[in-house]
Amino acid sequence: MKTSLFKLIGIATVVALAGITACSPSGGKSSGRALPGSPVSVAQVLQKDIPLEIAAVGRVEAISTVSVKAQVGGEVTGVYFKEGQAVRRGDRLLAIDPRPFEIALKQAESLLEKDRALLRNAQADIARYADLVRKDYVTKEQYDALVANRDVLAAAVKADEAGVANAGLNLEFATVRSPIDGRTGSLLIDQGNIIKANDTSPAVVIEQMTPIYVTFSVPEQNLARLREFMAKGPLQTEAVPAGGGQPRVTGTLTFVDNAIDQSTGTITLKATFDNSDGVLWPGQFLNVRLILTTEIGVVVIPSEAVQTGQSGQYVYVVKDDMTAELRPVKVSRAEGEESIIAEGLKLGERVVTDGQLRLAPGARVEIKTGR
């Protein structure tokens, strides 16, 4: 039995030695074949002009919103716009039955003419009595009474003139006109209805569309940097509708709130957009980019190339001999899908963007094609 055991051990030793020989550099089919490199994707270190910006979610807000109400009451005899129509300042919107106001104007004008006639007569009496009082034909008291009567009539004429102006203004108010350029909303009163002066409900609401605000908030930590760049000139703001599919529009930051919202720790900003093409609509949500400045000629790489280890951030650089070098880097900031490198890389070098987990310093690499 011991003899059989020794035979089995000997056979196993021979097999193991044969395997070692087959795997050795000088043995069998493996002779002269190099191990393949780890497959990786790479990107070149580039130099670009990168904007320094703050991203936020904004909401479109009309600069002016006017609730149009009638200043006189009466029957609505005409509607001269359609709901949702663009209107200009001074355009006629509604007509109120003008007849009561025309009658009131005529009455005021008649009263004015009457008092003017009385005033002219009183002035003539004073002119006649002036000579008589000097000759003592009439008493001074009679003359003073004539003068007082003239003054009363002069005051009455001024009151009548104001009454005529007021009646004319009411007649003018019988035509309701647009106070701003904008777009009308729903019509809340129809022709034939009775409208009240300064009613609680407006006849229509008009929103100013051009120009228009985009309101957004940023964390208060950005305030110092924001004020620094605002002192150098107007700040450009870009916005695109949250749903996408529409072009980016450009405006200018025009408002910074005078207080920080303590409940959210943010400060409210407003940018003004020309909106002549009507892309922006009140109430619409947007993705906003506030551009503080543009950094010229900075070194950038894809953010996916940057790894974080115990000693900080690093990248793998592919050397000319197709080996990987672990290179510590200092990242200034990330902007979208790119990272700005302050230290550690040179223009033209290649960094690994995919496959870092299979690498070690000095490992051979094989660059994947098709990316």
Image (tube, grey):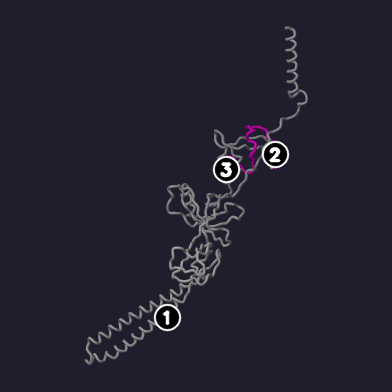
> Viewer-proximal residue, 168 or 223?
168
Mark 2 and mark 3 in contact (Cβ < 8 Å)? Answer: no
Circle 1 or circle 3, nearest the eye: 1
Please determine whether, in this image, residue 358 is positioned above or below residue 67.
above
Mark 1 and mark 2 in contact (Cβ < 8 Å)? Answer: no
Q: CA distance from mark 3 to mark 2?
A: 24 Å
Q: Amino acid at mark 1?
A: Lys
Q: Amino acid at mark 3?
A: Ile
**Residue in view at x 38 percent, y 79 percent:** 161
Measured from the top left, where is residue 93 in percent x and y?
51, 69
**Residue in view at x 40 percent, y 81 percent:** 109
Q: For the magenta stretch, what is the residue range?
A: 341-370
Disc number for residue 368: 2
* SS for callout 2: loop
Measured from the top left, where is residue 139 in percent x and y?
22, 89
Would you name the residue on which mark 1 appears?
106
Instruction: Reply yes or no: does residue 344 show up in magenta.
Output: yes
Name which of mark 1 and mark 3 comes first in the sequence.
1
